[in-house]
Image (cartoon, rainbow, N blue to C red):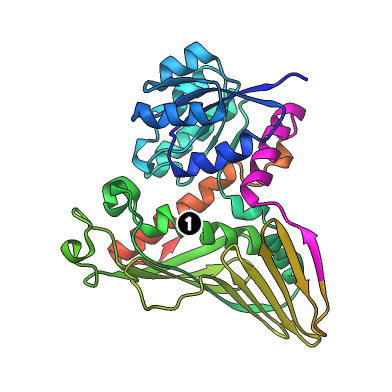
Amino acid sequence: MSKLRVAQIGCGGRNGAHFQKLSSFDDVDIVGFCDVILERAEARAKAYGSGKCFVDYKEMLDETKPEVVFIAVPPHVHGEIEPEIIKRGIHFLVEKPMALEYSVAEKICDEAEAAGIMTAVGFQDRYQSITEIMKDYIQGKEVGLVTGSWIGGIPGVPWWRTFETSGGQVVEQNIHLFDQLRFIFGEPENVYCASGKGIVDPDKYGVPGYNVDDYSSAVMKFKCGIVANLFTACYVVSGSHVINGITVWGKDFTVEYALRSWLKIYDKDGCRTYTRSNDQLTITEPDGTTTVKPDIEQTGIQDRAFLDAIKTKNPSLIRSTYRDALKSLKLTLACNESAATGKVIEL
């Protein structure tokens, strides 16, 4: 069996998740690992048992000649790496957000498409079983309001806490839920976002240089007619109780989705629950009976779909191409613009 030559740029946590999946595929050979901290690349190569290590991604691309690259780097780094990959005709999957300036991401997208390169963006929640169930159930039903939240603490990486390097929590983190709303309901017409600061004390929280918003609320009017409100916050410490995800209020049903964990559908038949755990999906019917099915973690489904799309030359297998992901990036950047200007941003 011929194997796809794959390389990774960035050997932190998110590419660690990709590594776990890629290393289990028998049609993949990971030939290169690149990170600004060489020891991280070396640790990844040691875990895999082979592969060359680099701190210069250009050297890695030229020496290992990968066919596919997985990119997971801080948001502000994008814009220089991708053109070098495109110039060499290499397919790539990039983690979100793809850039902090829309024009940078759009240029990357245009150049990749012109070169005939397959792309994917890491909106892995589109591949979840419970996302599919939720989307299928809602289709054709009357919905008015949707709310959602991504509320928690401050991630430990220093670049996350500064607006100049992360774009803030809406763009860097909650973009997943904004994308999920687009995947389920289609495109928004406009967005208004209000934000605030003052809860997070950088010294007390141990986050020197912190300058992003502590919290925000974004109201979106979608072309399909629904009004959605997504809450975002990073000031939460111990003692708080938060269930993040999405709630959909239909005419004669309610859907509750807990982020990557469970889904509950309430309607005239009662409550049906879908719970994910240990690669299984447990379905509990209104009468209490249960069914258990296999349920693969979404990153593995996403990565497999991307590689299969490359092998079969079938881009329809990819649920979040770079071109489609541009719309989610534009939406979250519009939230930042609205919060800064106080204006409704038309999309």
- As drawn, 4 above or below 247: above
Of 241 and 263, the residue lying toward us: 241
Q: Position of residue 244 (x, y in %)?
A: 51, 70
Q: Residue at x 34, y 67 (%)?
A: 343
Mark 1 = which residue? 175
The extreme top residue here reads 63
- As drawn, 334 above or below 262: above
Q: Residue at x 33, y 71 (%)?
A: 237
Q: Is 295 left or right of 107, judged from the image as shown?
A: right
Q: Position of residue 75 (x, y in %)?
A: 38, 43
Q: Residue at x 55, y 47 (%)?
A: 325
Classified by dominant secondary structure, the portion drawn in magenta counts as: helix
Kindly identify the amino acid type of the residue bearing the numbered disc 1: Ile
Q: Residue at x 52, y 31 (%)?
A: 47
Q: Is the residue marked by circle 1 packed among few (<14), some (14-19), or many (20+) residues within 10 Å? A: many
Quadrant of the snapshot with the N terminus? top right
Q: Position of residue 223 (x, y in %)?
A: 60, 65
> From where the camera sits, is residue 274 visible?
yes
Tell me if residue 309 is in the magenta stretch.
yes
Of 169 and 194, the residue lying toward us: 169
Magenta segment: 291-314
The extreme left residue here reads 203
Q: Is 102 left or right of 114, judged from the image as shown?
A: left
Q: Is 130 left or right of 70, judged from the image as shown?
A: right
Tally of numbered discs? 1
Q: Secondary structure at mark 1?
A: helix
> From where the camera sits, is residue 69 visible?
no
Can you tell which quarter of the image residue 6 is in? Answer: top right
Q: Position of residue 243 (x, y in %)?
A: 51, 74
Q: Is 77 left or right of 47, judged from the image as shown?
A: left
Tell me if residue 162 is in the magenta stretch.
no
